[in-house]
Amino acid sequence: MTDVFGLSHKDQTRHEQVVFCADDKSGLYAIIAIHNTALGPGLGGTRFYPYPDESAALADVLNLSRAMAYKNALAGLDHGGGKAVIIGDPATDKSEALLRAYGKFVQSLGGRYYTACDVGTYSEDMDLIARECSYVTGRTPANGGAGDSSILTAYGVYQGMRAAARHAFGETSLRGRRVGIEGVGKVGHRLVEHILEEGGEVVVCDVDELAVGRIRQRHPQIEVVPDAATLKRSDIDVYAPCALGGALDDTAVAELRAKIVCGGANNQLAHPGVEKQLADRGILYAPDYVVNSGGVIQVADEIAGFDMDRARARAGQIFDTTLKIFAIADDEGVPPAVAADRLAERRMSEVGRLRGIWLGR
Ligand SMILES: NC(=O)c1ccc[n+]([C@@H]2O[C@H](COP(=O)([O-])OP(=O)(O)OC[C@H]3O[C@@H](n4cnc5c(N)ncnc54)[C@H](O)[C@@H]3O)[C@@H](O)[C@H]2O)c1
């Protein structure tokens, strides 16, 4: 059952706190949602996007903050789920005053929510927000920040893919495997490099000809197909969605020739039930929020003073986590997406419960 916001009852009732923030002079209108803080302060990016109306923005921030709770839990972080949206067109509405006003509202939550980059916001924006607020990550390296999170996002996807290869093919190496990558932007182009380094073959597609041109120039051996539909029908071993969400719908699942799906995009399954369709066709799905958590691992590390080696080591653990999820899925007879949710909920419950142990004043 849904309400006027198009949200299920479950989505609406599971959030600890939702805050609306307005500053008319700078044009700021933002919503911060904290799904839960069982494992620690909420952590998730700020999306700056021209939503058609407030309902669409609210629905997005509630869904995104819930997803962050699950992602952070399985990334092994001491963070709960949080996310924020700023309603507006970043190309025309973003200003120093607006970002600093937003920083004041994040600060007002006293550390219950840490923000970072997302669609429409960049490390330079986090630098500005940080001038008003202590609870900001993903700043520029010049300011002590973790910088571009796509570095460890791509690395984590690569580790998840190796785990999937071990489970599906009995061999961890991607040497000789054909990997189809949809979208060669920040995450996708770095994933291409990892696959090629290991001796795999790569097929790509992207709606942006410049992005294709850039990667072709560096690696002329890469095959390019005209669009995502062609890529999914291609003779590939692994399909890696690294563009937008919803890449796996009924048609895509029916046509897919790959044995593994493992990519960086968020929300890859177009609707509930697709995870079962994949499993029924014998296609191994590495849950998106598990394998793309390298980025949040990278920015979370900044809170303790950024150390790339430490963050990379932690992102490397995505390999083991992904294997563990496949094992649970097999044991419990459920698709990996369901196993991942169960594992995340278990950690939130078991570790979150420890906060109830009284340590005195
Ligand atoms: N950057 C990160 O650290 C990070 C972390 C977690 C998840 N993600 C997710 O990974 C995905 C990619 O993120 P990014 O940072 O690389 O973004 P990006 O904008 O740099 O790259 C996305 C690429 O996909 C292409 N694209 C868009 N529509 C397409 C289509 N229909 N077919 C083929 N290509 C298409 C774009 O032209 C672009 O080159 C997104 O879903 C994002 O939410 C990113």
Image: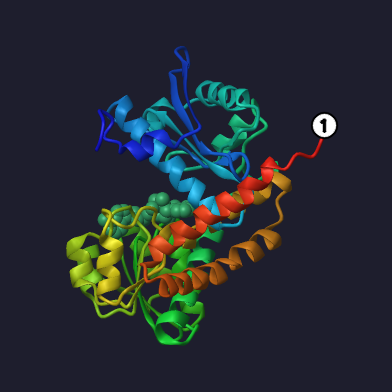
Task: Count neighbours of disc 1 (C-alpha within 10 A) and say few if under 14, some if 14 to 19, many if 20 or more.
Answer: few
| Vertical relation: 243 (above or below) 82 | below
Taking the spot 18% from the left edge, 70% from the top edge, the residue there is 254
Nearer to the camera, 213 or 291: 291
Looking at the rendering, which quadrant does residue 11 occupy? top left
Instruction: Indicate the colouring scheme.
Output: rainbow
Residue 92 placed where, x, y %? 38, 28
Residue 184 placed where, x, y %? 38, 61
Nearer to the camera, 244 or 160: 160
Residue 150 placed where, x, y %? 51, 56
Identify the residue at the far top of this view. 25
> Taking 23 as reference, is 358 left or right?
right
Whether residue 76 appears in this view of the structure is yes
User: Which residue bears the numbered disc 1?
Assistant: 361
Identify the residue at the far right of this view. 361
Residue 241 placed where, x, y %? 35, 62
| Ligand 1 contact, mark 1 (Cβ < 8 Å) | no
Query: Which quadrant is the N terminus positioned in?
Result: top left
Q: Amino acid at mark 1?
A: Arg
Looking at the rendering, which quadrant does residue 55 occupy? top left
Whether residue 214 appears in this view of the structure is no
Taking the spot 53% from the left edge, 39% from the top edge, the residue there is 36
| Vertical relation: 39 (above or below) 162 | above
Taking the spot 28% from the left edge, 30% from the top edge, the residue there is 5
> Taking 295 as reference, is 141 left or right?
right
Query: Which quadrant is the C terminus positioned in?
Result: top right
